[in-house]
Amino acid sequence: MSTYVIHPITLCRAQAEKSLMTYMAHQGEKIWRPYIFFLVEGQGGRFLVDTAIEAAQYQSYLPFFQKVEFQPLLSFDQALARRGLTPADIELVIQTHLHFDHCYNTARCGRAKVVVQARELAFARDPHPVQASMYRRELFEDLDLQVVDGPQEILPGVCVQPSPGHTPGGQSVLVDTAAGRAAICGFCCIQENFSPPADLTERLAPFASQPVLAPGIHVDPIAGFESVAALKQMSELILPLHEPAVMEVERVP
């Protein structure tokens, strides 16, 4: 069986409303939200999951983001160089979804095939106004896209699993590791989406869901809830895309 090691790599973090991650819960609370991509290496190959975004790139995306407090950490090139790599060394990127903050640097990997779900690509090319600002065609249109439709094995021990709700065509990446199956989430979330406090509805948010929380940013909160619940059942290890604690993780396992 092919197994892999996952390296979460953070380019920056920003002060953000926690409820953007946790539907109907923690309104008014702030967290430091990291912007992470994942380098995955093993017997079956090497690839990235997402390419994240640098602080300066984020702040230049829309004028409003100049008001957001960012902490820059690394450039994309610096992050890869710490692993002895350059963007030209990357031959495969699995894109969880096509929001700008997850694919901003994907075009830098000019030799890479980029795996994306058909539903996500179709929506990104013609987004509904409710999420139109999250997509820019120049970030993905000229990529060497490998379009898939539904669950699919990408490499031995690596599968993609549709995870709609946050976006129509988000996909999570299931990776076999020595410690069990790890899920790199295909939607914006933190650990609490998977394990909300038992007294959530009494203490924090009377209309919040249990036993999991849908993503706070979504096109379909019910589909988002089901995606969180399904991923929790499918994996032994969960890597949420914006979990602050993941910043401290050097490798999994």
Image: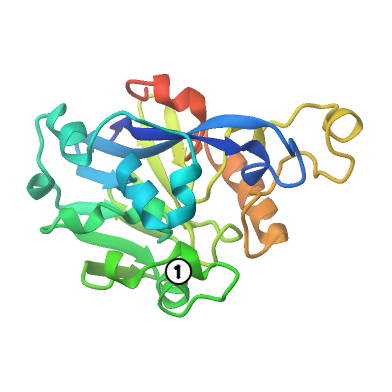
Whole-percent x, y for residue 108 in the image: 17, 54
Residue closer to the observer: 188 or 145 = 188
* Residue pointed to by mark 1: 120
How crowded pointer 1 is (Cα within 10 Å; few <14, some 14-19, many 20+) is rated as many
Left or right for 111, reference 162 = left
Residue 162: image location, x then y, percent: 50, 59
The image quadrant of residue 130 is bottom right
Q: On the picture, is 102 further left or further right than 223?
A: left
Image coords of residue 183 (percent x, y): 46, 40
Q: In which quadrant will I find the C terminus?
A: top left
Instruction: Judge by depth and name the residue closer to the eye, 136 or 170.
Output: 136
Residue 50 visible in the picture: no
Residue projecting furthest to the bottom: 126
Type of colouring? rainbow
Whether residue 172 is visible here, answered yes or no, is yes
Q: Quadrant of residue 231?
A: top right
What residue sits 50% from the left and 70% below the top?
132
Q: Nearer the viewer, residue 238 or 32?
A: 32
Residue 143 sits in which quadrant? bottom left
* Residue 25 left/right relative to 100: right
Give the quadrant of the N terminus. Answer: top left
State the SS at label 1: helix
Residue 133 picture location, percent across and down: 48, 66
Whether 63 is drawn above or below 42: the answer is below
User: Hey, what amino acid is under mark 1?
Assistant: Glu
